[in-house]
Amino acid sequence: MAKDTAALRKHKAKIASLGMDGDTVFHKSKLLLKIYRDVTWALDDHLEEMHDYAYEAGNQNAAVGFRYLADFAPTVEIDKFAERVCCVCETRMYVELINKALARVKVYPVYGDMYYQILDKQYISRFPLTEPEISEMLNIERSVFYDRKKEALYLFGICLFGYTLPEVHRLLTD
């Protein structure tokens, strides 16, 4: 098993100091980033469907359709549309939380921009690059790439679960 880098040990210690399990944070972070692209695509698709539905309901006028669906449609139709709107808003909120955490990663003082580039090019951007392509783009050895990627995933977890989510929770409970 490869020896942890100093940066990785630091990230793991920070996670532990926040009372979280490092492996859990790492795996949840990786899972969230793996589904990010699909979620944002589906979100855009749902927004387009809602717009089209309102456009049809409003006789080729989306604004009239939204007004009708909000105030005048039968209760069942209003409830169904409201549920879809809430689902889209909730999903959008989660995407924004991930974006905030990524922005924090980017400004991290040591390797922050490199961490961000790795996560962005592999998980976020519309057309992902392969690991060798990212390694070449960043002009780093393959072994260094894998170290930085692991560090980036841990740091992303710290930013999301240790800072961004607790801040939102404090805002909602104050």
Image: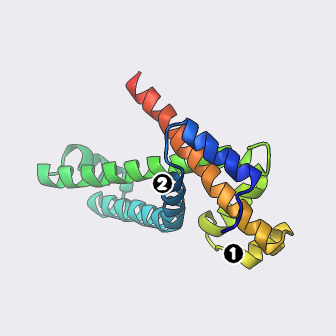
Q: Is residue 127 left or right of residue 110?
A: left
As drawn, 170 above or below 162? above
Q: Is residue 100 visible?
A: no
State the quadrant of the N terminus: bottom right
Q: Is residue 51 left or right of residue 15?
A: left
Label 2, label 1: how far apart the Cα atoms are: 26 Å
Query: Label 1: how many residues lie within 10 Å, few (<14), some (14-19) or many (20+)?
Result: some
Q: Which mark is residue 129?
A: 1
Query: Label 2: how many residues lie within 10 Å, few (<14), some (14-19) or many (20+)?
Result: few
- Percent from the top left, x then y, of residue 55? 35, 61
Along the viewing direction, whichever of 118 and 83 lies nearer the viewer: 118
- Percent from the top left, x then y, of residue 73? 18, 51
Indicate the quadrant where residue 107 lies: top right
Q: Secondary structure at mark 2?
A: helix
Compare marks 2 and 1 and give the one earlier in the sequence: 2
Residue type at mark 2 is Thr
Q: Secondary structure at mark 1?
A: loop
- Percent from the top left, x then y, of residue 151? 68, 56
Q: Is residue 147 visible?
A: yes
Number of on-image labels: 2
